[in-house]
Image (tube, rainbow, N blue to C red):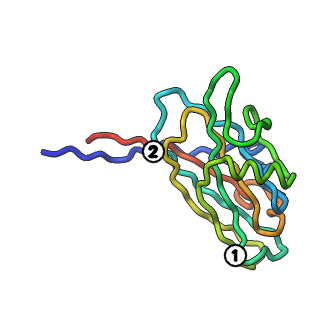
Amino acid sequence: MPNEILSKFSASAALDFDGASTNACINSLAAAAVCWCAPVTDASPCPPAIMLHAWIHVHSTAPTANGTVEFYLLRADDNATEIRDGEAIAVTTDHGIYTTAAGVARLRNEAEFIGAIVVDATTDITYQKSFVVNEPGTDWNVMIYNGTGQIFRAQSGSTGSGINWRSIIPEVQ
């Protein structure tokens, strides 16, 4: 009888964008800016894949039709002198926001693109999308770029914006 390899999912957990309950880094994120969550660290061996569940609430001012909310992965090597994808900024220990055009461009170019939400001109709406990331590693962050042309809605919790994640572990049956 052949074996099956099925996926086992961990419990969902919120990524910490300045306090997982408020997500202050994402909420009120300016147009053309990026923000990232606190690092997620796992012991080796770590899950070969993770699933992200994102919800982004756009402002009461209409976003630019076909604008995007882009998601990126920032990996690190866990060395004492850590190397992390993107510009050498403080993504190693905490959340953050970056707004200078040159810095945002470097971060977007050097991080791994995960996927995007394409928005329309509808106001005050929450977009939801999930993504699978393969081989995130033992130390990683998720970065968000606001390409909607408007600020994200300044709300917390489920009425604002955030990302939950869960590991995906294959298991032989």
Looking at the rendering, in which quadrant would you find the C terminus? top left
Query: Disc 1 marks which amino acid?
Result: Asn
* Disc 2, SS: strand
- Horizontal side, residue 173 vs residue 138: left or right: left
Seen at 75% across and 79% down, the residue is 121
Name the one closer to the observer, 123 or 103.
103
Name the one closer to the observer, 167 or 100.
100
Residue bearing mark 2: 168
- Residue 90 lies in what quarter of the image? top right
Outermost residue toward the top in this view: 80
- Horizontal side, residue 127 vs residue 169: left or right: right
Seen at 70% across and 75% down, the residue is 66
Q: Position of residue 112 (x, y in %)?
A: 61, 49
Seen at 38% across and 47% down, the residue is 7
Query: Disc 2 marks which amino acid?
Result: Ile
Q: Residues within 10 Å of mark 1 (few under 14, many from 20)?
A: some
Looking at the rendering, in which quadrant would you find the N terminus? top left
CA gap between label 2 and label 1 equals 31 Å
Residue bearing mark 1: 66
Q: Position of residue 61 (x, y in %)?
A: 84, 74
- Horizontal side, residue 43 vs residue 31: left or right: left
* Disc 1, SS: loop
